DNA sequence: GTCAGTGCAAAGCTTTTGCAGCGCG
DNA sequence: CGCGCTGCAAAAGCTTTGCACTGAC
């Protein structure tokens, strides 16, 4: 299998996982006694089509431009509910918080941020996960999650 | 050497490094054509006595209660200047940004955050640094720095 | 019918900026 | 004695909250 084919396969796997996530999210919400709602449904739909994290404003603008008239406050409220139920991961870097689907499989990635253009991209690394896995009891804490952010300059900005 | 003695030794090493950092900071600032100023001097003095990161407001309150009448805006401006010259590290988690001295030796630590009480503590791990060191070219980026945050519950909150 | 969800507007926070005066070099 | 530094107050984001209304179950 070529590198390109392997990447394509990984992308398809990702897409399928996200579709499953949207369904999973609806189920968990219903089980938590939450009613369906236009805005929250729209947010879930948008996140399920997204490779990486988005800010609340980006979500708001994207939905508006798709012709879904949601309020910014509703986007924040939807993201808050989804975070509470561990359906989305809230990331804090830069000026605004970013949100992305949290897959029930535990499968996850971390992020690289370009200091010049502000672009954020995902990456995954097995060795890093192994090292993080050994830190479950660091400092006497019960470690439930970890965030890693690499800062640098992307290929385009470096030219 | 006992574990306790080794910890004490590490603390002394840390304290010495921070005293050296304060001096280093003054030198770098002077070399950059910056004049001395009451507020910035106070911020440097406070950070040099600090084990881990503080928010701008925490620094502001601490200095005021020490009888050093600084303005909050000056604290932010001092931290901005120090960040620009890579003398302090700005960390973004929780609601407010946190700042801590950036040692010229490159020696550094990461953080564990207790989701229940909001406490932040430093930790260092050799295996983690090794794994991060291998990611200097991740995704085609020139990686200049990395932040790691572990989230969990501390020993006291877990009881 | 009840009560969660929604949109808008207003409020709350952290952080930045404008401005006049101070004081370091 | 110029210009960087400072404090205060005002402004500028991002995020949350109050409120009346809508609509899902």
Image (cartoon, coloured by chain):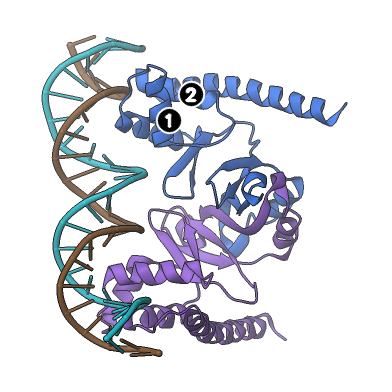
Chain colours: A purple, B blue, C cyan, D brown
* Label 1: element kind: helix
Q: Are marks 2 and 1 in contact (CB under 8 Å)?
A: yes
Per the rendering, the mark at residue B46 is 2
Which class describes the residues within 10 Å of circle 1: few (<14), some (14-19), or many (20+)? many
Name which residue lies at 28% across and 69% down.
A72
Q: Earlier in the sequence, mark 2 or mark 1?
A: 2
Q: Which residue is mark 1?
A: B59
Residue A108, given in percent of the width and then of the height, sits at: 61, 70
Task: Judge whether B104 appears above or below B146 on screen.
Answer: above
Residue B8, given in percent of the width and then of the height, sits at: 75, 25
Residue A29, given in percent of the width and then of the height, sits at: 48, 79
Name which residue lies at 61% across and 76% down.
A104
Kindly identify which chain the residue marked by label 1 belongs to: B
Examine the rendering and report whether any part of residue B35 can be seen.
Answer: no
The CA distance from mark 2 to mark 1 is 7 Å
Residue A96 or residue B140, whichever sits in front: A96
Name which residue lies at 50% across and 27% down.
B47
| Apparent side of residue A131 relative to residue A34 in the rendered image (left or right) | right
Where is the N terminus of chain B found, in terms of image quarters?
top right
Residue A116, given in percent of the width and then of the height, sits at: 43, 53
Examine the rendering and report whether any part of residue A145 can be seen.
Answer: yes
Name which residue lies at 55% across and 23% down.
B49
| Apparent side of residue D11 relative to residue A55 in the rendered image (left or right) | left
Residue B135 or residue A28, whichever sits in front: A28
Respond whether the residues carrying marks 2 and 1 are from the same subunit: yes
């Amino acid at each position: 299998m070529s590198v390109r084919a392997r990447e394509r396969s990984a992308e398809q796997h990702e897409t399928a996982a996200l579709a499953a996530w949207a369904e999973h999210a609806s189920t968990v919400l219903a089980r938590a006694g939450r009613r369906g709602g236009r805005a929250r449904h729209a947010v879930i739909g948008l996140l399920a089509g997204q490779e990486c994290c988005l800010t609340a404003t980006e979500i708001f603008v994207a939905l508006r431009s798709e012709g879904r008239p949601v309020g910014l406050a509703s986007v924040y409220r939807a993201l808050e509910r989804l975070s509470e139920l561990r359906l989305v991961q809230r990331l804090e870097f830069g000026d605004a918080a970013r949100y992305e689907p949290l897959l029930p499989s535990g499968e996850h990635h971390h992020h690289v941020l370009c200091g010049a253009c502000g672009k954020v991209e995902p990456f995954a690394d097995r060795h890093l996960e192994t090292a993080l896995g050994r830190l479950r009891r660091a400092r006497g804490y019960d470690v439930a999650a970890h965030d890693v952010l690499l800062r640098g300059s992307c290929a385009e900005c470096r030219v």
